[in-house]
Amino acid sequence: MTSPTSSLPPAQVGIIGFGAFGRLMARHLSPHVALLAHDPRLPPGDAQEDGARPVTLAEAAACPVVVLAVPVRALAATVEAIRPHLRPGALVADVGSVKCIPAAILRDGLPDHVEILGTHPLFGPQSARNGIAGLRIALCPIRGRQWLRHAAFLRRGLGLRVMVATPEEHDREAALAQGLTHLIAKVLVRMEPMPGRMTTRSFELIQEAVGMVRDDAPEVFQAIEHSNPFAALVRRRFFGLAAELDQELEAGHPGPAPLALASG
Amino acid sequence: MTSPTSSLPPAQVGIIGFGAFGRLMARHLSPHVALLAHDPRLPPGDAQEDGARPVTLAEAAACPVVVLAVPVRALAATVEAIRPHLRPGALVADVGSVKCIPAAILRDGLPDHVEILGTHPLFGPQSARNGIAGLRIALCPIRGRQWLRHAAFLRRGLGLRVMVATPEEHDREAALAQGLTHLIAKVLVRMEPMPGRMTTRSFELIQEAVGMVRDDAPEVFQAIEHSNPFAALVRRRFFGLAAELDQELEAGHPGPAPLALASG
């Protein structure tokens, strides 16, 4: 479907929003493409920041590819702000952890002369610590066909596993995968300190998973729990099944545990 | 504290109870020591089973080291049964997932002329699939000093990480580590099928942890939840904090999710 040369990266990418994820992305893209980054907290200048040159909003938004690395709740305002600066034929992509709501915002707010791609890199600063090859990215094509070329670059140039889905397919699966991971992590962090000696391999894996998401920006948890239309359903099922198990265990409990025995 | 030769394994070990864990143990001990195994479901004979020779209860219980690999709820009856066959100076060990209750049963039920060691190998058939070197075993010395020699063998001969603790120290930590792992796994298994495409590394680690315990014998979950004096407290905290988080999320939810937007 794509020729070898079509997997070349675009000439210039503008990143709007240069927080933890924008910077992670810049570090991996900068060996392949010229990067311009805009963030209100980052004054335009010549000094590179994580491989990107800080520029004005207008400059970043005028690139052939514009990536919106802003929290989901800031997406509508960002779309409004970049709108006048977008060039015809450009591709605009977001990187949010949910896809239904961003897809609607981008479709409704962007001019017809730009193409649109929803993306969700299924990793963050922690899980990407040892590189991103082999990690996953979800792509939700919304408008246009040039995303195919970028998908080829993500696959061959960065070694990512590309998962193509509709926004709804994405959000249904992510509500389970990410929703459950973050719910469990939140509860376990509140239960700390955790034991360090009598640990099993399975417990260590769960602790490792908690470690990967515990320092995620609060916006990530917000987006996953409040902006994914399926998150509340998953939560209901998880808490419902947990309560069910709790009742079963209480019912099956053979009376008070004979603690006294242990001191005999 | 121990001389090099003192880490030699004992001449003969009798295993009482030859289920999944007894067999796993036999496969790892048989290159080092002669093993006799007794299980009501295993007729005595000459053919080796997982490196052990099936024998009568009397023969297995007359070994210098006797390991009781039976469910915690069968421990008291097993102690009663082996009692007449034990030799003075023998070491009797159990391998249960909890330690306070077994310690009391062994201390109360065994004759004064045997030594006693509580053990909890912090692994099972799944987590030991790629070998046991580097995995953990908890030792709770109850009576006598020869356990030091066996600890040295477990460390040097089998490569295990040996954690020495009192039964109470063990049960407090295991209630968190094992209790939480099994609780989470039970709930997640009930939520299946799980997504296979939009998965993050952290979700995959949790799924891997679930895979390690999902096929554990029901007795393991029973022991962890019902025979650990601290398990109910951990459960109360987990379910309490989960309910608290649930309420916070519901309170913070910005109205019904705008699903309609997604189809626009």
Image (cartoon, coloured by chain):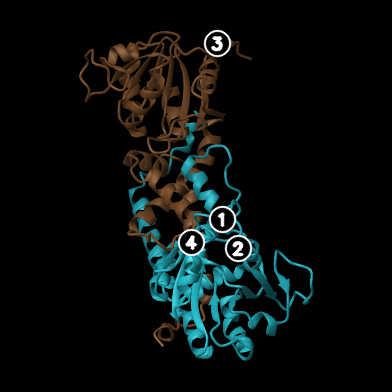
Chain colours: A cyan, B brown
**Label 4 Cα neighbours within 10 Å, binned few <14 / some 14-19 / many ≥20:** some
Query: Taking B120 as reference, is B186 left or right?
Result: left
Residue type pointed to by label 2: Asp
Q: Is residue A125 above or below residue A9?
A: above
**Label 3 Cα neighbours within 10 Å, binned few <14 / some 14-19 / many ≥20:** some
Mark 1 to mark 4: distance in Å? 18 Å
Query: Taking B54 as reference, is A71 left or right?
Result: right
Element marked by disc 2? loop
Check contact, mark 3 vs mark 4: CB within 8 A.
Answer: no
Q: Earlier in the sequence, mark 1 or mark 4?
A: 1
User: Can you identify the residue that label 3 sits on?
Assistant: B6
Classify the position of the N terminus of chain A by image quarter: bottom left
- Labels 4 and 2 share a subunit: yes
User: Can you identify the residue that label 4 sits on?
Assistant: A155
Write down the quadrant of residue B161 in the picture: top right
Chain label for disc 3: B
Residue type pointed to by label 1: Ser
- Labels 1 and 4 share a subunit: yes
User: Can you identify the residue that label 2 sits on?
Assistant: A216
Residue type pointed to by label 4: Arg
Element marked by disc 4? helix
Horizontal and vertical percent position of residue B176: 51, 46
Q: Disc 2 vs disc 1: which is toward the camera? A: 1
Q: Earlier in the sequence, mark 2 or mark 1?
A: 1
User: Can you identify the residue that label 1 sits on?
Assistant: A127
Q: Is residue B20 above or below residue A157?
A: above
Q: Is residue A125 above or below residue A54?
A: above
Q: Disc 3 vs disc 4: which is toward the camera? A: 4
Task: Tell me what residue is drawn at x 41 percent, y 11 percent.
Answer: B64
